[in-house]
Image: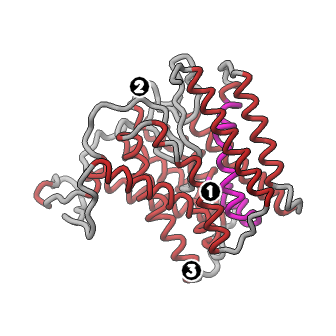
Amino acid sequence: MSTPLPPPRLPDADSPSQLFVPPQSQPLADVLPFPHAAADAPSPSPSPDLLADVTSPQSLADIPARRPFNLPDHFPFRLPATRSGRVALALCVVYLVWGSTYMAVHLSLESFPPLMLSGLRNLFAGIGLFIFAARRDPVWPTFAEVRNAAAVGTLLVGLSSGMLAFGMRTVETGTAAVMVATVPLFATVIAAIAGRKVAKGEWVAVGLGLVGIALLNHGDPSSGSTAGSLAILCGALFWAGGSFLAGRLKLPSDLLVSTALQISLGGAMATIVAWVSGERIVSMGFTPFMAYLYLMLVGSMAAYVAYAYLIRHTSPIIASSCMYVNPVVAVVIGALFLGEVITKWTVMATLIILASVALSFWFDYKRRGLV
């Protein structure tokens, strides 16, 4: 989902099954920098500023001639000069953009079929990120790494975002955002199935999350809403499964290359499946098209770069804070701009689910001696 998904937990050495873990043979930041990719990782060694790499001016003469394309040598905006300013900017982007993507998906669905929306949006966003990555003269991946990126991207991007969009045809944006926040709970279940010993407190967190989901759907028992909720939960499950797979496969060593390949190849797979299954764009309205552009350019490209910057330059707590902010932003935006009603059940369920996720992270940190 360019959609904001729950934050990163990094497994310890004896638990390779945790979610959002980079392959053991690659640096932490090489995992797909989605809202929840590697927040638990120790601070990496000093490295070139990722955002500066992407946006800083560079003369055309500095770009190797072997590339078949050139990017503009300057951009119509300037990043903050200080590190704290850039961190603040990245947090604002991640909080507001990922929190608003749910409304953008809702508006796009007026013209786009769900799986086609997921596929096209991520395919072109991935291509754009790949161009930025190529400008940085990265280490190019092997065929096996590209294949692995395609497999991970199909789960993380294609199926996960597609199921979210499918469910949001009948589920309100705020409700969808809160449900997506259950990804870490699914990750706990997958880790247990894979053989990691799960503490009782972690199972309590999973049970608490299920209670929150039940309350979230209490006010709308219609069959359409139930089916949509199940689709969104399946999307969260695909995300957790893709994150688990990312921790087991060798992915490209360069952060932007890895991200671009996973997004673009996952989007390509979703587009192919959408086309084969008969999805077609019959008509295109102005608002849905602008929402689509927002999802592609801002929700995918800009927000992923900002999140990657946070992973490299801040603590795990700061990087993963979007997990708790995004659902709240989505609920507020849905109420203000789409007229969605915030009921007492919505408030109770949101608090319970976020508490369950916080509890899950706390037990995970405690197990690894971080608290």
Question: How many neighbours does mark 3 have within 10 angstroms: few (below 14), some (14-19), or many (20 or more)?
Answer: some
Q: Is residue 282 above or below residue 218?
A: below
Which amino acid is tagged 1?
A: Val
Confirm whether the magenta stretch covers residue 93: no
Residue occupying image coordinates x 28% and y 59%: 79
For residue 153, side relative to residue 346 (left or right): left
Looking at the image, tell me whether mark 1 or mark 3 is earlier in sequence order: 3
Q: How is the image coloured?
A: secondary structure
Marks 1 and 3: CB-CB under 8 Å? no
Residue under circle 3? 287
Distance (Cα) linking label 3 and label 2: 44 Å
Confirm whether the magenta stretch covers residue 185: yes
Residue under circle 1? 328
Label disc, if present, on residue 25 of the rendered structure:
2
Dominant SS type (magenta): helix
Q: Looking at the rendering, which quadrant does residue 89 occupy?
A: bottom left
Marks 1 and 2: CB-CB under 8 Å? no
Chain part drawn in magenta: 161-190
Residue occupying image coordinates x 51% and y 76%: 290
Residue occupying image coordinates x 53% and y 19%: 369
Question: How many neighbours does mark 1 have within 10 angstroms: few (below 14), some (14-19), or many (20 or more)?
Answer: many
SS at mark 3 in the image: helix
Question: How many neighbours does mark 2 have within 10 angstroms: few (below 14), some (14-19), or many (20 or more)?
Answer: few
SS at mark 2 in the image: loop
Which amino acid is tagged 2?
A: Ser
Q: Of the residues tagged 1 and 2, which is closer to the observer?
A: 1
Query: Looking at the figure, which quarter contains the N terminus?
Result: bottom right
Looking at the image, tell me whether mark 3 or mark 2 is earlier in sequence order: 2
